[in-house]
Image (spheres, rainbow, N blue to C red):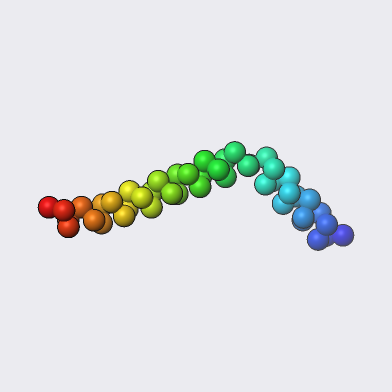
């Protein structure tokens, strides 16, 4: 019973936060790209 309730809550949370999760993933990718670029800058100068 408790497992079913937990799965229902998890599904509801993921459904409600779907657009936010996409925005967070895009932000994380942008941060990684900026980190890689910043680490390679000294090699260009």
Give the vertical position of 41 relative to 23 (above or below): below
Q: Residue 12 appears at what percent x and percent y? A: 73, 45
The part of the image, by quadrant, that contains residue 19 is top right
Q: Is residue 2 left or right of residue 40?
A: right
Count of numbered circles on the image: 0
Q: Residue 34 appears at what percent x and percent y? A: 33, 48
Q: On the rendered image, what quadrant is the N terminus found in?
A: bottom right
Instruction: Look at 20% across and 52% down and name the residue there.
Output: 41
Q: Residue furthest right?
A: 1
Query: Which of 29/5 is in front?
Result: 29
Q: Is residue 37 left or right of residue 5?
A: left
Instruction: Look at 83% across and 57% down and name the residue there.
Output: 4
Query: Which of 20/32 is in front?
Result: 32
Q: Is residue 1 left or right of residue 11?
A: right
Query: Which of 26/6 is in front?
Result: 26
Give the vertical position of 9 relative to 1 (above or below): above
Instruction: Look at 55% across and 43% down and name the residue there.
Output: 22
Instruction: Look at 16% across and 53% down and name the residue there.
Output: 44
The part of the image, by quadrant, that contains residue 7 is bottom right
Q: Residue furthest left?
A: 45
Q: Is residue 21 left or right of residue 2?
A: left
Q: Residue 21 appears at what percent x and percent y? A: 57, 45
């Amino acid at each position: 019973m408790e497992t079913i309730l937990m799965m229902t809550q998890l599904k509801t949370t993921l459904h409600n936060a779907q657009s936010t999760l996409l925005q967070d993933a895009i932000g994380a990718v942008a941060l990684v790209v900026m980190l890689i670029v910043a680490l390679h800058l000294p090699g260009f100068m």
